[in-house]
Image (tube, rainbow, N blue to C red):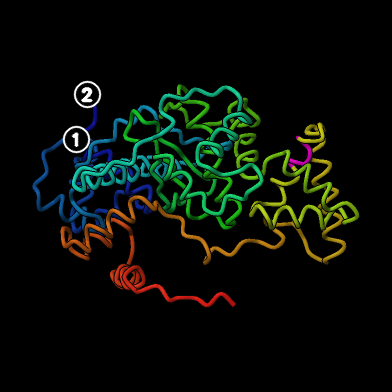
Amino acid sequence: MDQSPLGENIRRYMKLKNLTIPSLADAAGISSTTLSNCLNDKSDPRISIIQKIADALEISMAKLFAEKPSFENFRLRSLYALTAKEKAYRENLLFSTYEKIQEYLNVERFAQEENQFIFSDDKFDDPIEAAHVVRERLGISQSDPILDMCELVSKMGIKFFHFDFNYDKTCGASVAASDGGPAIILNSSIASVERKIFTIAHELGHILLHKESFKSSETMEQKNSAEENEANLFAGELLCPQDVVFEKVKETHGFSFIDMVMKIKQIYRVSYGTVLHQYCNRFGISSHYSDVTKKFQAMYANRNKVSFKNHYEPYALNETLYRFEDPFLRDVVVRLYQEEKIPAARAAELLTWKKSTLEDWCKKMNAPSKQTLPF
C-alpha cells in the first residue's frame, strides 16, 4: 500500500532539516512511537498531533497534506549524483515550482490576461537557426546585445521563477507547456550574473529544441550529451552570435587576444567562456576550446596577477544592476494592486517583495517623467 502524503512529507522535511525521529519527536513534544506511526501510516493521528509536528518543522500544516505534484514534463537534471539531502531538496523544488506555476495561472485568470507562448507551433532541429529565429521574431538584430534575458523570455510567453534550490549541482530547470509552462526556474544561489544569464538561455534552448524530452523521472544528465551540447550552442549563439564575434575580431585587429575577448565580453554581457566558445565555433576549432581557455587564463592571470580559481570572472557583471524576475507577472500584479483588486500584502507575497519595495516601485512608476535637456 502506498504511503500517505503525510508520512512522505514529514520524511522530506526531516531530511531538509537534518532531523531524526527522536529529535523531531522531542521538538514536537510527542513520543517517538507516535511519530513513527505517522511516518509509516500505522495510525490516524489527531489534528493536534499533526499541528505539533508542523510547528516543530516550522511549516504550515497544509504542507504536510500536500500531494506530490504530478509533473510529467519537468526538466531538472544534474551532472553529478545527489546526496540524500539534495534529493529531498530536489523533491521540494517540485512542490515549490508547482505552487508557483499555479499561483501564476491563478493571477492570469483573475486578471483575465494571459502571456501566450509565441513559439508553441515551432519545431527546431538546428540550435543556431533557432537562436537566429528568436532574435528575428523579437526584433533584435544579430549585432545587438540582449540587455535583459528575463524580458526576452517574458516576451516569448515563458514564465520565469528565481529561487534558491539549496544545492549547487543544478543551475536551472524548465517546465514544458503541458504542465502549466513553459517555464524557466533559475537557481538563485548561482554567484555569477553571467552564469545566470547563460542558464536562462540554456533552459530556453531545451524548451525550443527538446520539447519531447521533458521527463521528471530523469534526474541525471550525461556530460556532453547531445541535448546539453545543443542547448549550450543555442545559448551561446543567442547571446553572442558567431558572426558578430568574427566581425568584432576584425574590428579589434591589433588588439591583444585578451583585450579582444574582454571587449566582446563587455559589449554582449556574457562570460569570457561564452566568448571563447563562440570564437572557437566560428573559426572551426571547437575541439580546442579547452586549450584556448587555458591559454587565455594563463595570459590574463600573468598580466593581471589574479587566479581563475573559484570560477573567477574578469570584469564581472554587478547583480544589483539586474532584476531576475518575471516582468509580465510583476506588471500584472502591480496593476491589480493599484486598481485595489488585491491587497498590498498579497501583491508583495506573489512577487516575493517586501511591502516597502512594492510601494517604492509604485511611486516610481507613478512619478511624472522629468523633461531632459538636449544638451
The first of marks 2 and 1 along the sequence is 2
Q: Is residue 366 above or below residue 226?
A: below
Q: Residue furthest front?
A: 374
**Direction from residue 286 to residue 142 in the image, left or right:** left
| Gap in angstroms between the C-alphas marked 2 and 1 | 10 Å
Tell me which residue sits at (77%, 61%) in the image: 307
Task: Residue under label 1, please give it.
Answer: 41
**Direction from residue 137 to residue 281 in the image, left or right:** right
- Amino acid at dot 1: Asp
Q: Is residue 80 above or below residue 315?
A: above
Q: In which quarter of the view is residue 72 placed?
A: top left
Magenta includes 73? no
Task: Residue under label 2, please give it.
Answer: 1
The image quadrant where one finds the N terminus is top left
What is the number of the mark on residue 204? none
- Amino acid at dot 2: Met
**Direction from residue 183 to residue 203 in the image, left or right:** right
Q: Is residue 257 above or below residue 105?
A: below
Q: Which is more toward the observer, 320 or 42?
A: 320
**Which contiguous range is marked in magenta?**
277-281
State if disc 1 and disc 2 touch (CB < 8 Å): yes
